[in-house]
Image: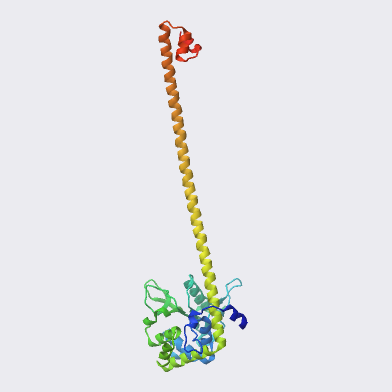
């Protein structure tokens, strides 16, 4: 398996991971890598770091709320046989029954908002059992870390989203989505949020040393990231994930390109159809105009010929009255003799 992974990865540049060098001996793995994110926060040894990360970003809760967090199966149970199965990065349960869903989304897909809404709704739905009253419902809290700008209209590192009334007042806090935007770390409203954001985005040895020297909490958190990064198995897992992400990106880009090309072909076909229809209508109009002109010309020719015939008949009478024979008149005016005889 490892050999196959190494073969797959030959010549592949893992920019998000390999650029973060702490030393020449090993690459510093990134928490923006989904696999490393889960390894870091799922580890029993890192419960203090998980608590610190949650405390920094989930507000209005007491410190002891996070003391007895239990990691749950991240596969969300289906409500019906034909339901889609959802797998989240981390699913946690607090001592009071609240569920906390934690997600790392480095790249945003087109349906990101719908996807996060569905995850949160499914987490909320898993706690309600048949026969229970709605009064027993606990909070479903989503904490989603992104590394791509989602909202252009606000400079907020932390967006807190509830169900609200039109007047802006909160309708309920049972469902809550927290968006942590790593592209806006400078706008973090607390030092702890900023420090955690920087740990996610650390790229150089100097940046890491600054975090280690910043506080005891971040020193331990940063050193544990180094420990994870030193493990060759974790390096291979991270590389494999990056490879899979790159392949997915290429597939998606290829699919998007093919869809765009198909749309362009369809647009060209529609334009060609419109142009052909327009040309056909113009040709029909020209044909109708030509037919009308031909009919008018035929009428004009008949009218001219009728007028010429009338003038010849008048000339025939005049020549006959002058004493010319019918034969002479017919020959001179190029008329049939029977026509001339009818004039007599």
Task: From the viewer's side, name the closer residue of 143 and 342.
Answer: 342
In the figure, 57 relative to 288: above or below? below
Quadrant location of residue 238? bottom right
Q: Does the rendering let one see residue 306? A: yes
* Residue that extends furthest to the bottom in the rendered view of this protein: 216
**Residue 119, x across and y down, in percent:** 51, 76
What colour-coding does the image apply? rainbow
In-front residue for pair 188/326: 326
Can residue 58 be seen here? The reply is: no
Q: How many marks?
A: 0
Point out the residue furthest to the top here.
323
Q: Position of residue 225 (x, y in %)?
A: 49, 89
Nearer the observer, 83 or 262: 262
Name the side, left or right, on which 166 lies relative to 68. left
Is 209 situated left or right of 237 in this image?
A: left
Instruction: Name the residue at 44% across, 17% down.
Output: 309
Q: Nearer the viewer, residue 59 or 159?
A: 159
Q: Position of residue 52 (x, y in %)?
A: 45, 89
Query: Along the horizontal axis of the image, is 60 left or right of 76?
Result: left
Name above or below for residue 171 compared with residue 324.
Answer: below
Say which quarter of the image contains residue 180.
bottom left
Q: Where is residue 104 drawn, in percent x and y?
A: 49, 80
Residue 306 versus residue 190 in the image, above or below: above
Task: Check the picture and name the quadrant holding the N terminus.
Answer: bottom right
Above or below, comparing residue 277 to residue 125 in the picture: above
């Amino acid at each position: 398996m490892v050999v196959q992974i190494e073969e797959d990865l030959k010549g592949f540049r893992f920019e998000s991971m390999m650029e973060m060098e702490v030393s020449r001996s090993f690459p510093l793995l990134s928490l923006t890598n989904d696999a490393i994110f889960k390894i870091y926060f799922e580890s029993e040894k890192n419960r203090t770091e998980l608590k610190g990360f949650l405390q920094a970003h989930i507000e209005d809760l007491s410190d002891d709320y996070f003391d007895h967090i239990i990691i749950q199966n991240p596969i969300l149970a289906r409500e019906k046989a034909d339901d889609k199965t959802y797998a989240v990065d981390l699913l946690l349960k607090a001592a009071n029954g609240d569920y906390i869903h934690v997600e790392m989304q480095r790249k945003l897909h087109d349906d990101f908002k719908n996807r996060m809404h569905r995850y949160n709704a499914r987490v909320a739905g898993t706690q309600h059992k048949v026969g229970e009253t709605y009064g027993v419902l606990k909070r479903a809290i989503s904490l989603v870390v992104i590394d791509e700008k989602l909202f252009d209209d606000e400079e907020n590192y932390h967006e807190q989203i509830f169900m609200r009334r039109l007047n802006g007042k909160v309708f309920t806090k049972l469902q809550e989505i927290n968006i942590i935007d790593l592209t806006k770390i400078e706008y973090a409203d607390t030092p702890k949020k900023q420090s955690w954001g920087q740990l996610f985005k650390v790229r150089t040895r100097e940046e890491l040393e600054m975090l280690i020297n910043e506080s005891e909490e971040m020193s331990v958190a940063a050193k544990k990231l180094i420990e994870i990064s030193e493990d060759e198995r974790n390096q291979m897992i991270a590389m494999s994930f990056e490879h899979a992400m790159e392949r997915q990106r290429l597939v998606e880009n290829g699919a998007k390109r093919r869809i765009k090309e198909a749309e362009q072909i369809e647009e060209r076909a529609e334009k060609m159809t419109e142009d052909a229809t327009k040309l056909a209508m113009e040709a029909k109009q020209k044909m109708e105009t030509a037919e009308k002109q031909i009919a008018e010309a035929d009428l004009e020719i008949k009218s001219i010929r009728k007028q010429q015939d009338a003038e010849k008949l008048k000339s025939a009478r005049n020549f006959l009255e002058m004493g010319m024979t019918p034969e002479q008149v017919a020959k001179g005016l190029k008329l049939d003799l029977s026509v001339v005889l009818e004039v007599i």
